[in-house]
């Protein structure tokens, strides 16, 4: 029952893909008890009578999880059900302490949303969001030799399950959707959406239908795809497997499958006939939790401009590259920093460059948040203006950025003077520099004159270095050219 | 035996030593327990430690509280931190509760001395305490008969005069019916009046904790201590609760209806005779009593079916956690998971529990849930509405608590349908979430229940708990102190 991976989608069939994504909400505590919701702690250290289902314990709904769930659903353009009801989903599993999962079945908190996906290399498209509902996570079973060990640290952590419509057609679209979704969830601060930590997990529903047909084929569900690469691999494998079956005139069985990244194949986990009867029943320990319309409105008002809209605005207003626009809108704090800086420089492309390369370098080197930098948007903007005005070379500018961070009391202008970094544009001084470099690197200069044009950069670099970064590189290029080409 | 109120008053005044109070109770226990077998674990040393704590508080000049030094026995499905908690099931043998239940917290805070864990039908499933996973409890009036159930241990302990107060839990009649069969007062509060936190769940939308007492006034006292909002039970009613003791015990002008649905033909004739006398007492004390012709509680006839569907469905999920994985005994060859589940649950659960889990699982399963579980919820809503409408015209409803008196051990054990009739008159108030009390109203004169107690059931509107308890107190005053079981005065 294994399917070979194939890069070739079947010719006569159109894949129909829908995704279910489990997102761990970034709350302090679990969904129904006060245990911390944290990753990477020693086994069974984040547990209490409630999340281990001791007899007599009762759930109390975490209001922060509700808030984050609604915030995420609003960011996905969902309609919000303000009367939160929960159900018990019954099945036996050693990592499910109560023997049922508390989830939302009949009335998800969010429904009828959509997500616009724009990504390099594929045409923009929109994906409908069928539902988004709150539920608790299960624990984990770890197998060690003959032992099965149970870790309940994760049991009861809050999840938002987001279900897309069957709107995706290719593995590439599916991955682009997931990346866009992940960026959005991080952007609005509801989840760290880290696939490695399991806080962003994906199941994929796939069916094939005859090209041009409106009728959906029988679908399979492939579980637990925990990297973008696995999502793409599993979808390719499943599309190929179903295509081969249909081409051979055989039916596709409705079943749950797993993906083995080593072989690149999917394999049967269970047939539909053996599917669980979850016996959904009202969670009678939790009466309806009513969120006021005002609270929903407040959450809506508190949403930032969403990354897609902001990205479009950056592209439109600043003529930024899509790469820079994507990078700036990955994180609202970064986008805010950029916007405060560009408001002072009025030079979007240059500002994007300095923010993405230099401000982020400072964060990285100092292990600091943007908000903690001594290099505030105001101070960085002053520097960018100096560079744009030709008063400072790019290279010297980078040195000033480092100095800005080290000496919070001095302005960019003061640091340029202190470091003596004024750009040298004086023709005589530069000519002298050029002659010195040609003398010192005669063989390089000779190879340049013999036709190796690429060596011009090396000569300019040497001159820049000799000037301590102060020389105007544009002027140097002109002078080198004039001097060496004149010899012919 | 002194009333709880007098014990507390005298302990607070310094006229009574809590240790003496406890030792007297322990003496009674030593003599009478063998006749009733009310306790799963008398937990005597723990009780002595609790009494010591009350003494220490007195010595520090503190007021130990409204139950200062009063011995109170708890049904063994109510958690007390560090003490055993079996819920009457072999599946929890040896288990110790990690935390206090909300009601235990409140009892301890008011100076009560928790004395022992009382017997019950496994997980509260039964009406005779014969379905305990450990042993049967005997009726203090006749040891050949059942004490009722599932809170049979608590009712028998109070009726035998071992303790003045005990806590029971009720899902379909489990406080009031054993109280009636043992000749003591039992009160099921409005759903949400008392926190369920720390109470082993059976049917979560029905379960309530309530007092069982030798005196109606003591039941009100215990209710006042345990009732009130608990933020850790989301079904707990918000806001302040009125004190039941502060309501005047007066029947004057109270409109009491007796629905003919409560006088079902399946109710024993001689039980009915006692109820008629009790209604006479109510009228003589100033209540306006009136028969309500058949029809206004038209859906009550479905109560037992609805009760079983709702309670068993909820129980089938509530009891899923007893899987032998995290706590309790495990029956397994140590290799495979599913045999572990099957053997643990199949071996440790008794037949009644297994029957109800199977019924509830069926009622919730795909393709059947609409016809059974959801339909039961619809009828439950109708029953609730019919009661609400009756309370537009009446303050209280009166009738028998149980269709019959205490029945012989073993008589109904193998006949679940006959056993289910025990809930005939109590399940409706549970389905509707109403406060309801059973007070002793005399002994049967003739026939198969001759010499056995009968309970009068008074039911009020949702949230009217103080009024229901006040009526019970007034009835006890009007009628006089209840007849006591032969064990009441038994000494060594
Ligand atoms: Zn916990």
Image (spheres, rainbow, N blue to C red):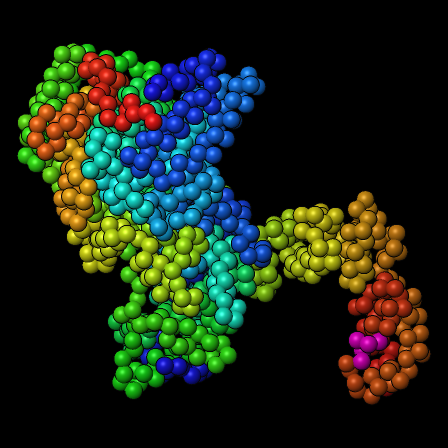
Looking at this view, is B165 or B341 the one in front? Answer: B165
**Where does the image place residue A106, in percent across and percent down from the top left?**
30, 51
Q: Name the image quarter holding the C terminus of chain B.
A: top left
**Where does the image place residue A196, in percent across and percent down from the top left?**
55, 64
The quadrant where residue A237 appears:
bottom left
Instruction: Look at the picture and state if B234 lies above or below B221.
Output: below
Q: How many marks?
A: 0
Q: Name the image quarter holding the N terminus of chain B.
A: top left
Left or right: A307 as drawn, with respect to B487: right
**Where does the image place residue B444, in percent across and percent down from the top left?**
12, 26
| Residue A305 is covered by the magenta coloring | no
Q: Is residue B393 visible?
A: no
Left or right: A249 as drawn, with respect to A311: left
Left or right: A32 as drawn, with respect to B427: right
Identified at 39% across, 49% down, the residue is B93
Identified at 51% across, 46% down, the residue is A35
Looking at this view, is A288 or A436 the one in front? Answer: A288
User: Farthest residue in the front direction?
Assistant: B492
Instruction: Look at the picture and state if A194 lies above or below B11.
Output: below
Left or right: A425 as drawn, with respect to B16: right
Instruction: Look at the picture and state if A171 lies above or below A278.
Output: below
Magenta: predominant secondary structure element? helix
Looking at this view, is B119 or A367 the one in front? Answer: B119
Q: Is residue A126 visible?
A: yes
**Where does the image place residue B387, in percent across and percent down from the top left?**
17, 30
Instruction: Look at the picture and state if A160 lies above or below B449.
Output: below
The quadrant where residue B380 appears:
top left
Identified at 89% across, 85% down, the residue is A443
Which contiguous range is marked in magenta? A455-459
Identified at 28% across, 31% down, the residue is B155
């Amino acid at each position: 029952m294994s399917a070979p991976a194939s890069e070739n989608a079947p010719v006569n069939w159109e894949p129909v893909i829908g995704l279910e994504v489990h997102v761990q909400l970034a709350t302090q505590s679990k969904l129904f008890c006060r245990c911390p919701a944290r990753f990477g702690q020693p086994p069974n250290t984040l547990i209490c009578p409630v999340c281990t289902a001791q007899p007599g314990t009762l759930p109390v709904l975490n209001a922060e999880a509700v808030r984050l769930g609604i915030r995420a659903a609003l960011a996905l353009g969902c309609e919000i059900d303000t009367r939160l009801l929960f159900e018990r989903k019954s099945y036996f599993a050693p990592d499910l302490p109560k023997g049922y999962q508390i989830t939302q079945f009949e009335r998800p908190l969010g429904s009828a949303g959509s997500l616009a996906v724009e990504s390099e290399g594929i045409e923009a498209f929109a994906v409908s969001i069928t539902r988004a509902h709150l539920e608790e996570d299960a624990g984990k079973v770890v197998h060690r030799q003959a032992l099965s060990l149970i870790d309940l640290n994760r049991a009861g952590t809050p999840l938002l399950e987001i279900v897309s419509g069957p709107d995706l057609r290719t593995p590439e679209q599916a991955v682009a959707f997931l990346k866009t979704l992940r960026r959005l969830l991080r952007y609005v601060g509801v989840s760290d959406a880290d696939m490695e930590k399991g806080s962003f997990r994906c199941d994929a529903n796939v069916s094939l239908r005859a090209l041009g047909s409106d009728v959906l084929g029988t679908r399979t569900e492939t579980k637990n795809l925990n990297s973008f690469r696995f999502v793409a691999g599993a979808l390719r494998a499943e599309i190929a497997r179903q295509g081969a079956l249909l081409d051979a005139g055989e039916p596709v069985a409705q079943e749950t499958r797993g993906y083995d990244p080593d072989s690149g194949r999917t394999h049967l986990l269970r047939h539909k006939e053996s599917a669980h009867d979850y016996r959904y029943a009202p969670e009678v320990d939790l009466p309806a939790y009513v969120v006021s319309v005002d609270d929903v409105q407040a959450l809506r008002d508190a949403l930032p401009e969403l990354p897609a809209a902001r990205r479009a605005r950056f592209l439109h207003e600043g003529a930024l590259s899509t790469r820079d626009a994507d990078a700036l809108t990955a994180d609202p704090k970064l986008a805010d920093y950029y916007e405060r800086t560009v408001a002072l420089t009025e030079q979007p492309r240059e500002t994007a460059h300095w923010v993405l390369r230099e401000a982020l370098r400072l964060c990285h080197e100092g292990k600091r948040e943007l908000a903690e930098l001594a290099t505030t948007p105001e101070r960085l903007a002053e520097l960018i203006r100096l560079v744009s005005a030709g008063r400072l070379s790019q290279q010297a500018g980078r040195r000033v950025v480092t100095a800005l961070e080290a000496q919070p009391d001095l302005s960019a202008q003061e640091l340029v003077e202190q470091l003596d970094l004024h750009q040298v544009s004086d023709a005589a001084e530069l000519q002298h520099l050029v002659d010195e470099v040609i003398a010192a690197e005669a063989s390089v200069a000779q190879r340049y004159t013999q036709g190796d044009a690429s060596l011009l950069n090396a000569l300019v670099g040497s001159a820049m270095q000799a000037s301590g970064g102060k020389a105007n590189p544009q002027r140097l290029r002109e002078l080198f050219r004039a001097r060496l080409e004149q010899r012919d | 035996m002194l009333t709880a109120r007098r014990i507390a008053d005298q302990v607070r005044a310094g006229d009574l030593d809590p240790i003496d109070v406890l030792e007297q109770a322990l003496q009674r226990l030593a003599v009478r327990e063998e006749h009733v077998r009310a306790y799963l674990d008398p937990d005597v040393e723990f009780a002595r430690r609790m009494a010591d704590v009350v003494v220490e508080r007195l010595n520090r000049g503190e007021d130990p509280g409204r139950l200062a030094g009063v011995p109170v026995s708890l049904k063994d499905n109510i958690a007390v931190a560090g003490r055993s908690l079996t819920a009457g099931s072999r599946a929890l043998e040896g288990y110790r509760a990690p935390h206090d239940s909300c009601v235990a917290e409140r009892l301890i805070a008011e100076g009560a001395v928790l004395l022992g864990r009382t017997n019950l039908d496994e997980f509260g499933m039964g009406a005779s305490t014969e379905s305990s996973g450990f042993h049967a409890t005997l009726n203090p009036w006749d040891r050949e008969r059942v004490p009722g159930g599932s809170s049979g241990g608590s009712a028998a302990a109070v009726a035998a005069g071992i303790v003045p107060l005990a806590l029971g839990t009720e899902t379909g009649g489990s406080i009031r019916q054993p109280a009636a069969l043992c000749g003591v007062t039992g009160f099921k509060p409005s759903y949400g009046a008392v926190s369920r936190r720390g109470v082993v769940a059976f049917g979560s939308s029905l379960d309530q904790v309530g007092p069982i007492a030798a005196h109606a006034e003591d039941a009100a006292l215990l209710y006042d201590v345990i009732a009130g909002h608990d933020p850790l039970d989301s079904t707990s009613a918000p806001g302040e609760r009125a004190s039941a003791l502060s309501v005047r015990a007066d029947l004057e002008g109270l409109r009491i209806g007796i629905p003919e649905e409560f006088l079902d033909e399946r109710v024993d004739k001689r039980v009915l005779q006692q109820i008629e006398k009790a209604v006479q007492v109510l009228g003589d004390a100033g209540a306006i009593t009136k028969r309500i012709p058949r029809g206004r509680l038209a859906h009550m006839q479905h109560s037992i079916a609805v009760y079983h569907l709702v309670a068993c469905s909820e129980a089938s999920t509530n009891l899923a956690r007893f899987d032998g994985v995290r706590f309790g005994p495990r029956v397994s060859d140590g290799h495979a998971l599913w045999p572990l589940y099957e053997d643990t649950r199949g071996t440790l659960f008794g037949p009644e529990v297994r029957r109800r889990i199977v019924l509830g699982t069926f009622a919730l399963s795909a393709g059947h849930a609409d016809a059974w579980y959801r339909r039961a919820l619809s009828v439950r809503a109708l029953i609730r509405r019919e009661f609400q409408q009756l309370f537009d015209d009446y303050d209280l409803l009166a009738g028998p608590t149980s269709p019959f008196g205490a029945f012989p051990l073993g008589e109904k054990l193998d006949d679940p349908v006959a056993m289910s009739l025990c809930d005939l008159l109590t399940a409706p108030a549970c389905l509707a979430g109403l406060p309801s009390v059973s007070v002793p109203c005399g002994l049967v004169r003739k026939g198969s229940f001759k010499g056995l107690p009968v309970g009068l059931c008074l039911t009020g509107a949702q949230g009217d708990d103080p009024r229901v308890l006040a009526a019970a107190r007034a009835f006890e005053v009007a009628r006089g102190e209840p007849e006591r079981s032969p064990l009441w005065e038994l000494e060594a």
